[in-house]
Image (tube, helix red, strand yellow):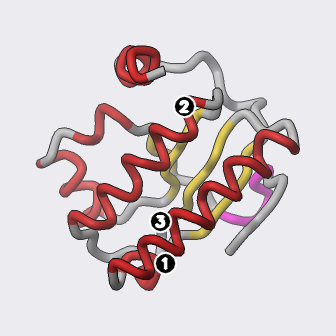
Amino acid sequence: CLAEMFMSYFKSDADCSEETDFLITVTPEDFATARDSQIFAERIQQAIDDAKSNGSSRLALDLAELEQIRSVGLNGLIAVNSNGRCVGLSVVLLNVQAKVREVFSLTRLERMFEFEERSAPGSPVVGNTA
């Protein structure tokens, strides 16, 4: 699975416009402490399981509330991406603020993720574990 995950980072998915997203809102509190990050990881694993059982093809993480991100947050998102891809889910980061996007760019992690800007109303959502 690790080799598949590595190779998938450098491939762009086909037209994703008709895929059904499983939406999760990420807040600064999700990464405030190591314990919060652990709770976030458990919540995300449940969301991955729920997304697969609901027939979702993508796990969408709305990062609009994050004004900054530290290494614990980046590591958490890397784990989400890895776990999601291992079970066939595409992971997309929504509404990433410029300062946070810059961190992804500086760390070269932007190649690992899909980014989209989307307004909440009218967005396809199967489940919301906010």
Tell me where residue 116 appears, x and y as whole percent: 50, 46
Please report contact status of discs 3 and 1: CB closer than 8 Å, yes or no.
no
Please, what secondary structure does the residue beneath circle 3 have? loop
Query: Label 1 to label 2, Cα distance in Å?
Result: 22 Å
Q: Nearer the viewer, residue 121 or 42?
A: 42
| Amino acid at pointer 1 | Thr
Tell me if 25 is positioned left or right of 35 in this view: right
Task: Give the foreground label among 2 and 3.
Answer: 2
Please, what secondary structure does the residue beneath circle 2 have? helix
Query: Label 3 to label 1, Cα distance in Å?
Result: 7 Å
Give the residues drawn in magenta, as a range.
Answer: 120-124
Task: Give the foreground label among 1 and 2.
Answer: 2
| Amino acid at pointer 3 | Leu
Tell me if 49 is positioned left or right of 107 in this view: right
First in residue order: circle 3 vs circle 1: 1
The residue to which callout 2 is attached is 85
Tell me where residue 53 appears, x and y as whole percent: 85, 42
- As drawn, the label of residue 88 is none
Please report contact status of discs 1 and 2: CB closer than 8 Å, yes or no.
no
The 10 Å Cα crowd at callout 1, few under 14, some 14 to 19, many 20 or more, is: some
- As drawn, the label of residue 27 is 1
Q: Quadrant of residue 67?
A: bottom left
Looking at the image, which residue is at 21% across and 63% down?
A: 71
Q: Nearer the viewer, residue 11 or 35?
A: 35
Looking at the image, which residue is at 56% across and 57% down?
A: 61
Looking at the image, which residue is at 48% across and 70% down?
A: 64
Looking at the image, which residue is at 36% across and 21% down?
A: 6
- As drawn, the label of residue 63 is 3
Q: How many marks?
A: 3
| Amino acid at pointer 2 | Arg
The 10 Å Cα crowd at callout 2, few under 14, some 14 to 19, many 20 or more, is: many
First in residue order: circle 1 vs circle 2: 1
